[in-house]
Amino acid sequence: MTIEAKRPRRNARHEPKPYDFRRSTKLSRKHVRSLQIVFETFARQWSTLLTSSLRTVSQVHLATIEELTYDEYVSRLRNPTMVNVLTLEPLAGAGILELSMGNAMVSVDRLLGGPGTGVQPERPLSDIESGLLGQLVLRVLGELRYAFEAIVRMEPSVKAVEYNPQFVQAATAADVLVVATFDMRVGADESVATVALPFASLFPLLELSLGVDIAAEAAPSGPKISVEERLAAVPVEVSVGFRPTALTPRTLLELTVGDVVSLAHPVAAPLVVTAADVIFAHAVAGARGRRLACRVVGAPETAPSNGRDA
C-alpha cells in the first residue's frame, strides 16, 4: 500500500510578488515589523472607536504595508474617494488618510441615527456631513498619534479634504510613501482605507527606534578602511619645475631652435612641486647617486628682492 503525503496548501498571503529591480526596496524586515506593530495597534484602536461612535460592531484589520511612489499610490485610488491631507508636525511632508465614499456615507448615516444600510450615494459630502465626519476623523487621528508614540510624537491634523485623487497635491510624483492598507467592516458594509506617510521623514525615526547607532555607522567600517589603504598606495604623478612664465602667442610662434627664453623664476627661489597642476610643496634641485633628485623645503615667506631671474 502506498501512502501519498498531502502537499501543504500555499497561503494566498505568501504568493510570489513582482519585484521592480529599477527601484530597490529600502524597508527591511525589521522596519516592516516595527510598522506592522504600530499599524496593528492603530487598527485595534480604530475598531474600538468606530464601534463606540457608530453604535455597531466595527472591525479594522491591517492588510498590507507597501513602499510606493506618490504617483503609484494615487493611481490606485478610486474616484470619488475621501482624501484627508494631513500635516504631521513636527515631521516634514504631508500624510494621507483615505476613506471610501461608501464608508463615509455609512458613518454619516449612523451618526445621524440611521441604520447605515442600503445603497449609499457616491458624491462629495455636504457641509453638515463634512462637519459630522470631520469630528470622527479627528478622533481617528488621535488614535494614530497614540499608535506612533513608540516611534515619534507627532500631531496629525487635517489640512484639506479632496474627493478627486488627481487634484490632491500632497507630494511630487516620485516621492516615496509608506502606505498601509486596512480592511474595514462597519456593520454590514465592507470597504478599504489607506494611510500614507512620507518615507523620507519616517525612515530615520524607524532606524532610531531599532537602536541603530548613527555614530557607529558614520565611523569607518572594514571595507571603507580597505579602500582608504588602497587609495594611499595609488601612484600619483608629481612634477618638479620652475614657476610658470607667461609668453605672448607671437613669441611662441616665432620660437626657433637656439632661442633663449627668460624664465620668471628667481635664482634663489625654490622649485615648485605640483600634482594635477596644484602646488603642494617646494624643493631645491639636487642628485642622489647618478639620478637627479630634489629636497623638499619650506615655502619662502617673501620673494627675494634682489634675486636674479633664471
Image: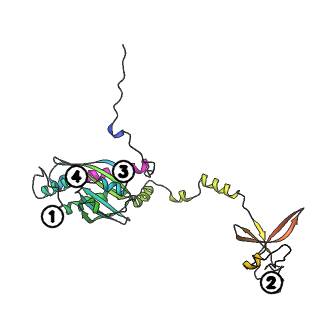
Residue 123 lies within the magenta run:
no
Please state the horizontal and vertical placement of residue 132, each as a whole percent of the image. 16, 62
Tell me the residue that label 3 is attached to.
66
**On residue 126, which mark appears?**
1
Q: Which residue lies under the disc numbered 2?
A: 304
Contact (CB < 8 A) between labels 3 and 1? no
Q: Dot 3 surroundings within 10 Å: few (below 14), some, or many (20 or more)? A: some
Q: Which of marks 1 and 2 is nearer the N terminus?
A: 1
In terms of secondary structure, where does tag 3 sit? strand
Which residue does the image show at 84% across and 72% down from the upper left?
Answer: 257
Q: Which amino acid does label 4 sit on?
A: Thr
Part of the protein shown in magenta: 25-46
Which one is earlier in the sequence, the residue at label 3 or at label 4? 4
Q: Nearer the viewer, mark 3 or mark 4?
A: 3
| Residue 96 in view in this figure | yes
Residue 180: horizontal and vertical position, in percent? 32, 52
Q: What residue type is labelled 1?
A: Ser
In front here: 123 or 134?
Answer: 123
Query: In the drawing, what numbered circle is on residue 291?
Result: none
Mark 3 or mark 2: whose residue is earlier in sequence: 3
In the image: residue 276, left or right of residue 36: right
Dot 4 or dot 1: first in sequence order is 4
User: Which residue is the site of mark 4?
Assistant: 48
Marks 4 and 1, how far apart at CA: 26 Å
Q: Tell me which secondary structure the magenta stretch mostly adopts.
A: helix
Q: What residue type is labelled 2?
A: Pro
Distance of label 1 from label 2 (alpha carbons): 88 Å
User: In the rendered view of the protein, which quadrant contains the C terminus?
Assistant: bottom right
